[in-house]
Amino acid sequence: MLTKGLEDYLELIYKTILNNKNIKAVDIANEFNISRSSVSEALIRLADLDLIIYEGRKGIKITKKGITEAKKIINKHNILLKFFNEVLKIDYQIANKNACKIEHVADDCVLEKIKNFSDFCIKNNINGENTID
Amino acid sequence: MLTKGLEDYLELIYKTILNNKNIKAVDIANEFNISRSSVSEALIRLADLDLIIYEGRKGIKITKKGITEAKKIINKHNILLKFFNEVLKIDYQIANKNACKIEHVADDCVLEKIKNFSDFCIKNNINGENTID
DNA sequence: AATTATTGTAAGGTAAACCTAACATTATGT
DNA sequence: ACATAATGTTAGGTTTACCTTACAATAATT
């Protein structure tokens, strides 16, 4: 299983590539406030796991396996974000921050249940603002 | 801030004491499948933080500060457990396991919102079993 | 009481994930 | 083209949270 750090980096790599932008090691370092050398090591590890193709300055490419993995993580993130923000009506920044942390620890089956419940609540306008007596 | 490990150990210490039972370092080691020496270190750290009074074989006592802290963690745990198990209708063991992980990373304000929403859902019989089309 | 088992501690080790500093390489600006 | 800046890598270090092994102290069994 991927560590929280590797998941975060892969997530950023995929999102950036999806946006048709290039991503460099230094960008990851800046985004997460870690050193370039730490990123260097992490990218080698992601490459070892066949999640990215890393050729230093030549760029970072994501593999099919990497895309699958990144999508999973982003999916988890989005389920949590949506639930926190749209159902519980938690401030977006805080919702996002908490989604970022919980996405690495919550089991798939829990996320699945949250997703279904969240969709139901949104459809029926049940949320944290109209549920207070 | 306490680490996940220290929070877990303190939680167990408090729960055991609440049950009028004594708790020893070896019990913590067994519960979390870690070595006695790791527990030994952790207990010294908890004592340094004034959360417990630790005197080796003479026993482990919890301080007022420790009780306050333990209650906070257990409260978080219970909010999550209740939401997962009673609202989302997730299997108790899985609900508990996930509560255990998320309690260490979720912000207080998120837990607060989950609690309110959870109570509302329970009161109105809105749950993961009657919300599927 | 003597033996055996249990418990706690100390010493030293490991792996992960970070760090800084120094260096090499590649881009960029003039 | 050259100087400067940006980027990636290497080497070596730190911290955290574990570990094992060995030993000391206490408790339990016979």
Image (cartoon, coloured by chain):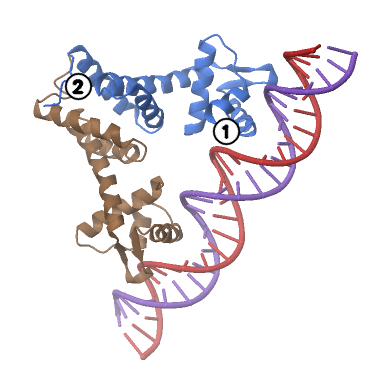
Chain colours: A blue, B brown, C red, D purple
Q: Looking at this view, name the residue that lies furthest to the top.
A: A20
**Do callouts 2 and 1 mark residues in contact (Cβ within 8 Å)?**
no
Give me the residue at 51% from left, 11% from top. Answer: A18
Q: Please tell me which residue lies in front, C27 or A77.
A: C27
**Numbered disc 2: what chain?**
A
Neighbor class of circle 2 (other Cα within 10 Å; few <14, some 14-19, many 20+) is some
* Drawn side of residue A117 relative to residue B123, left or right: right
Q: Say if residue B118 shows up in the picture.
A: yes
For disc 2, the marked residue is A129
- Badges 2 and 1, same chain: yes
Q: What is the secondary structure assignment of the residue under circle 1?
A: loop
For disc 1, the marked residue is A34
- The quarter of the image holding the C terminus of chain B is top left
Q: Say if residue A112 shows up in the picture.
A: no
- As drawn, the label of residue A3 is none
Q: Which quarter of the picture shows residue A89?
A: top left
Give x and y (percent) for residue A102. Answer: 37, 31
Give me the residue at 55% from left, 31% from top. Answer: A33
In the rendered image, the vertical position of residue A13 relative to residue B84, given as above or below? above
- Three-letter residue code for mark 2: Glu
Give x and y (percent) for residue A104. Answer: 41, 31
Neighbor class of circle 1 (other Cα within 10 Å; few <14, some 14-19, many 20+) is few
Give x and y (percent) for residue A124. Answer: 17, 13
Nearest to the eye among marks 2 and 1: give it: 2
Give x and y (percent) for residue D21. Answer: 54, 63
**Numbered disc 1: what chain?**
A
- Three-letter residue code for mark 1: Ile
Mark 2 or mark 1: name the one nearer the start of the chain: 1
Q: What is the secondary structure assignment of the residue under circle 2?
A: loop
